[in-house]
């Protein structure tokens, strides 16, 4: 289109594109907006009408060919930003990567182009590989607001993506970040879909499998909404925050590590989506598979054991659903060329006794040290899983994995390997202890423990301060089937911070998480194990 | 459950519930977070571990039996909040309703109970009346974050609620707020579903209908993502911000008003949901119907005319979809006892010439004044709509409405009524004018205008500063079917603010919104009108 300007009056001359003087000065605001870019603009901004941008809620910030999208908050307080400034939240400031005082301009933010695909998904359409690539690229670049991510998660969770779509999404997520290559034919890993407190089998499987000589470079997440992740618990014993060079070095030397995966950009879109997904409490099968497989493939695994616990308060509550999930893992795993096995386990109650980093680390070390008080369910589950992982080794005869694992554990070789890993990563200088504020929850009647609610126990441990306070959590004295007398302690809450202690106690008073009844009321295990 | 405390060491004594001294001091932060409660807590807060709340992203703030939920931002800058304070965004501060310095405590926020129903909707279930009541109550109470609202909108938009669900949702929204009762058997209104720039027929229909003696208490919204709402345009001429007493008074005296509806709490859940819906660009039929009908019923209408424009760049693009929408309006309207008629109109291009408050007000006044340069399409459409509204009067013979409307307009009685309304509401003291920064967009070739993109024209007017700047917008010189020569102006952009002027010009350069071609390429009107 041709276009000419009919400029009336002198004021029209101001209409040129903003020069350096016509820009806003960048200010870093110490506000952590938790994985969302936020920009703060004064209502009386000298250059832009803040409210003109508000309805669409996002703006684009531009400087030196860098551009970021951010959600807009309008500010009326000059102590936060002046009319000549633009304030950025911590995430946004880091993403833009410029110094304070830098001159920037802003533009109207178009919704990310890939939102058109999200709208098609909302309308019930099937998306193709290009759609998923575009969506994941925009999410990785933080071009999506949390409301847009929520829209994508619900739209793709609701009609449940077909298995090809799950594969496309997984591949797009995998390709959104870095990827480790260990240059070995057999790089093993195990992963549990989560939801069972105290389930710290990785810290046992890794030393057992590595003692056998297999390569198992285990990177784990920190807890998001659970009371402890493997990285949080391992951190009680060792440094887990390793840069990538050091991580590779340790793995080369000792065949294993137990590190936090956050230093590498492995499937970064996953971290962004999880920050929205968890508070919403939605976790569709397709999203679970793409989240787990994209992370594990990015970490360089060639062989992967997936643990799906089933139980009335587990993530998966019916055997039928577990089988559907298993097939979906197998399909996507096959497409992406990872050798994948699924094991369905008993998820009726927490594993071990401790819930929370210190208490869980204690359980793990008791098992490694073959102590008589070590929780037997944790030991047995870890041996079964380690046995299955060992059988990825072509030289291990089918069915022999379990006894090899047991030999490695009983002989103390697993403990030696664990100590080697701890030393290589760096022993934790701080001596964490269980929280000093304690409160025992007692049985209201004589009987047998017939139910322990995984969600409620996790919730109580979380309120007590886990995982931020390493020593906070819950210590279970009684497990399913144990006989209890009225007034006998069922579990102990540990906390360090008075407010947390009071939150956890109140929560346990509203619902203890335990049910006492008669032997025959105990729900059957879905799985013989 | 029985419970006893085993308190170790003196520190355990701190575990009592917080006393006045053990609370945070309330601080009002001048941050407008646009319809979402946000709370700012210092990372080193003295009483609570800020990060312990972060994963679930929300907290509950409690004081004097008042409780609000708010999204949590963790702050590292003491100028924003100190460790002894809690900062609230403007919305949250107003909602809590306490003074600065008041002592408050915080608690873990449980997700709103009704999110369980949203999750069932995500899983594809049909919701019942109680579910919708619970969801709308929680949304009205601002217990939903924007990500949760997004989840609800997508879940209920995706499978498209069945018509009973739309009825349940509408009733829940209607009952979430106040409701006018005019104590008359015939209270008329008209409403367009939107999407057509310049479509300011209400400002003509209201004076015509009121001059006939019908009661038409028109409350309108301000534009959210469009370049002007009726309230924005009426404000060029008169005060629209009337308290409820004054509004009732004017309506009693003059049978009509043209006021902003925001002073009354009419379907307040609608305003909250729209603030999420619009930036996402989702607008399902069910949500459209419940939004419009809940507002109109709350405003006390007994008879309602709904205008559904159809065209290639209108909200409704196919006659089939328009008919589906019509039936849905009719079904829900019948259930709720409103006498409802739907009219399907030509939505191929903007109505009138001006887009933006000042320019649209000019068009309206030209029609009322029977000026020869008045845009005929605006006049004709307003007469048709007014005619249909007049036929709600049992004394008007079927088919006679149009000529009655025309007589009222041609005789100047509509203009007199408009002036009466303006005077009653209060003449606008400020004399708004069209923006002084102007830019003409010219035709690139000889031919006929074969397409004008509603969305792009609205977008350009919006970028030019409408509706915040009353004088900003676009003035169309050529409409569909008009012959143009190469270099002849198609439309003029008006702006007041240099940054806005440059945004609008750039946008018109990337796509003018016009297509020039041959006569026979003009798309046929879907509707004979």
Image (spheres, coloured by chain):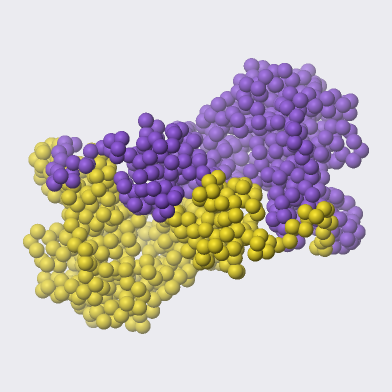
Chain colours: A yellow, B purple
B200 displayed left or right of A271: right
Q: Please name the residue shown 21% across and 42% down the image.
A: B14
Residue ranking furthest to the left: A372
In the rendered image, residue B166, in percent from the top left (x then y), is placed at: 55, 36
- Give the quarter of the figure containing the N terminus of chain A: bottom right
User: How many callouts does the rendering have?
Assistant: 0
Whether residue A29 is visible to the viewer of this picture, yes or no, is yes
B399 displayed left or right of A435: right
The answer to whether A463 is drawn above or below residue B93 in the figure is below
B469 displayed left or right of A489: right
Of B55 and B334, which appears nearest the observer?
A: B55
In the rendered image, residue B129, in percent from the top left (x then y), is placed at: 48, 32
Of A314 and A47, which appears nearest the observer?
A: A47
Of B88 and A393, which appears nearest the observer?
A: B88
Q: Please name the residue shown 28% across and 35% down the image.
A: B19
- Image quarter for residue B183? top right
Whether residue B167 is visible to the viewer of this picture, yes or no, is no
Q: Please name the residue shown 38% across and 50% down the image.
A: B42
Q: Please name the residue shown 74% across and 57% down the image.
A: A14
B444 displayed left or right of B138: right
In the rendered image, residue A463, in percent from the top left (x then y), is placed at: 28, 47
In the rendered image, residue A515, in percent from the top left (x then y), is placed at: 20, 41
The answer to whether A521 is drawn above or below residue B313 in the figure is above
- Give the quarter of the figure containing the C terminus of chain A: bottom left
């Amino acid at each position: 289109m041709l276009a000419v300007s009919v400029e009336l009056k002198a004021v029209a001359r101001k209409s040129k594109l903003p020069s350096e003087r016509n820009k806003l000065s960048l200010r870093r605001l110490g506000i952590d907006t938790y994985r969302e870019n936020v920009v703060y603009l004064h209502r009386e901004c000298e250059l832009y009408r803040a409210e003109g941008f508000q309805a669409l809620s996002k703006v684009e910030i531009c400087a030196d060919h860098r551009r970021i999208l951010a959600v807009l908050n309008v500010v009326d307080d000059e102590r936060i930003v002046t009319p000549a400034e633009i304030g950025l939240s911590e995430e946004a400031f880091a993403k833009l990567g410029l110094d304070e005082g830098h001159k920037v301009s802003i533009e109207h933010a178009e919704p990310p182009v890939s939102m058109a695909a999200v709208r098609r998904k909302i309308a019930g359409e099937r998306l193709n590989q290009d759609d998923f690539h575009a969506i994941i690229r925009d999410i990785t670049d933080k071009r999506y607001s949390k409301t847009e991510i929520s829209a994508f998660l619900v739209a793709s969770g609701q009609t449940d993506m077909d298995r090809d779509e799950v594969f496309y999404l997984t591949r797009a997520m995998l390709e959104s970040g870095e990827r480790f290559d260990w240059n070995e034919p057999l790089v093993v890993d195990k992963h549990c879909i989560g939801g069972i407190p105290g389930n710290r089998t990785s810290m046992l499987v890794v030393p057992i499998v590595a003692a056998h000589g297999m390569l198992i470079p285990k990177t784990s997440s920190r807890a998001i909404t659970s009371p402890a992740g493997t990285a949080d618990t391992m951190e009680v014993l060792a440094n887990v925050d390793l840069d990538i060079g050091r991580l590779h070095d340790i793995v080369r030397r000792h065949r294993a590590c137990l590190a936090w995966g956050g230093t590498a950009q492995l499937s970064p879109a996953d971290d962004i989506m999880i920050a929205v997904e968890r508070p919403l409490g939605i976790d569709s099968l397709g999203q679970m598979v793409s989240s787990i497989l994209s992370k594990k493939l990015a970490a360089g695994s060639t062989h992967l054991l997936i643990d799906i616990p089933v139980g009335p308060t587990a993530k998966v509550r019916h055997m039928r659903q577990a089988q559907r999930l298993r097939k979906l893992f197998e399909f996507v795993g096959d497409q992406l060329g990872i050798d994948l096995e699924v094991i369905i386990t008993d998820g009726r109650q927490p594993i071990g006794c401790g819930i929370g980093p210190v208490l869980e680390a204690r359980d793990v070390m008791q098992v490694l040290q073959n102590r008589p008080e070590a929780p037997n369910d944790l030991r047995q589950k870890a041996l079964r899983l380690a046995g299955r992982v060992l059988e990825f080794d072509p030289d291990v005869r089918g069915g022999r994995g379990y006894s090899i694992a047991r030999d490695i554990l009983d002989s103390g070789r697993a403990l030696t390997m664990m100590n080697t890993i701890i030393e290589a990563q760096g022993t934790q200088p701080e001596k964490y202890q269980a929280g000093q504020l304690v409160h025992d929850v007692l049985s209201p009647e004589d009987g047998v423990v017939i139910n322990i609610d995984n969600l409620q126990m996790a919730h109580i441990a979380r309120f007590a301060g886990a995982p931020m306070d390493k020593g906070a959590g819950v210590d279970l004295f009684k497990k399913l089937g144990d006989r209890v007398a009225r007034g006998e302690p069922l579990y102990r809450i540990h906390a360090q911070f008075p407010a947390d202690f009071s939150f956890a106690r109140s929560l346990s008073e509203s619902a203890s998480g335990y049910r006492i009844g008669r032997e025959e009321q105990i729900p059957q295990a879905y799985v013989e194990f």
